[in-house]
Image (cartoon, helix red, strand yellow):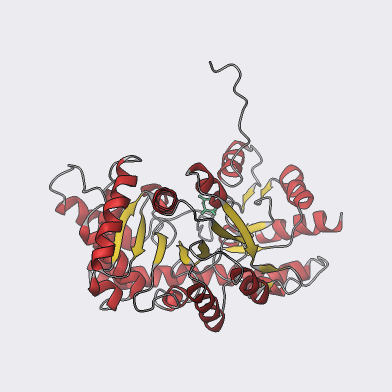
Amino acid sequence: MFEAIHSAPPDAILGLSEAFRQDPNPKKINLSVGVYQDNTGKTPILESVHKAGQLVLERQKSMSYLPIPGSPAYAAAVQQLMFSKGHEIETSGRAATSHTPGGTGALRVAADFIHQQMPKATVWLTQPTWPNHPQIFAAAGVPTKNFPYFDVKTNGLALDEAVAAIQKMPAGDVVMLHGCCHNPTGIDPSPEQWKKLADVIHDRGLLPLLDFAYQGFAEGIEEDTTGLKAFLRPGAELIVCSSFSKNFGLYCERVGALTVVAKDKNAANAVQSQVKVCIRSNYSNPPAHGAELVIAVLGEPDLRKLWEKEVGQMRDRINGMRQLLVKTLKAKGVPGDYSFITRQRGMFSFSGLTPPQVEALKTKHAIYVVGSGRINVAGITDQNIGPLCDAIADVVKA
Ligand code: LMR
């Protein structure tokens, strides 16, 4: 039965991490997967999370199953962080949140839900988008199409082209955007641009779906909800797929959430009953530990304060590395103007490196970058910046 099966190609992002692990070169540099690294190249456990772990151990009374959508305390914590405590969406009960295994799990449950409840809908993805987006929707049987997002000439947002494309989408389709720190370009709409996009999506009768995995990496926890909040309108519907992998460093705990905002509480209850069907036939119910850590950090004022400080430190380090990268590329005489890198936000930078240059970085210099030229700036350190820029100079000049 299995002899006719061909090998699948390695995953566009996680496959690079596997190759990186196997590379014996001691000077190797991993700028591929979206994982934060400190200035020594380590992915730390946040102190706030570490302290919360001790609380969780003391508090935990049972390891029985959680409800299908996870614990209500986790759902409340997710909603309060995204919508701000006391917001009408949070208090009205018209948002239904489920704890999913990571943001990817949230996307897959959303895709199953769309497939089952909105069978005629196409999901529109930004060009470019995260390589896993089309795969997730395809696996659920949901068709996807692309619309313009990135303007190569300005290294900025192609707002007019995006708006023109949205105005032609059939009502009832789904438009997916990244809530902040857009993956992979590092380009976010400004508050005015968010409003424009939300107006057009709303007027056209489309359903917005936000992939919101980097809250806190652009400007701050509250500030980074600007894009999301542009879609919060009385009675308006919305899907948010969020994650605590990055801002809590809880990558391996798989702590994400699917939040569906419906017209009113009754509609939200019906939606949640269908989301539960999708979850039950997928992974049944979520793992508990990571969610308990999030509940403890967000619920204890001292831990929350410490966590916000730690998110700020991660953000500042990444921004510092953006400045250093641009300065060092210039100092090493790499041709071109790379100042746009300092205008992008979050972990990622769409560097402009071409696929052959990316390949040469890997084979000649053991530097791992996603094929699209997306660089994880959080993988740059004071130690590797010199060799990295020498290698970029080499491949660009070649
Ligand atoms: C990334 O984009 O690198 C991360 O979100 C990890 C992943 O699952 O692809």
Position of 394 with respect to 132 (left or right) is right
Position of 396 with respect to 368 (left or right) is right
Q: List the single residue furthest toward the left.
A: 61
- Does residue 398 appear in the picture of this structure? yes
Picture layout, residue 80 above or below residue 104:
below
Relative image position of residue 60 (x, y in whole percent): 16, 50
Residue in front for this viewpoint, 134 or 53: 134
In percent of the image, x 59 and y 41: which residue is there? 11
Relative image position of residue 107 (x, y in whole percent): 44, 53
Q: How many marks?
A: 0
Picture layout, residue 95 above or below residue 105:
below
In percent of the image, x 45 and y 74: which residue is there? 224
Relative image position of residue 294 (x, y in whole percent): 29, 60
In percent of the image, x 87 and y 54: which residue is there? 398
Residue in front for this viewpoint, 204 or 344: 204
Position of 87 with respect to 195 (left or right) is left
Residue in front for this viewpoint, 161 or 241: 161
Q: Quadrant of residue 149?
A: bottom right
Q: List the single residue furthest toward the bottom.
A: 192
In percent of the image, x 50 and y 58: which residue is there? 36
Picture layout, residue 148 above or below residue 69:
below
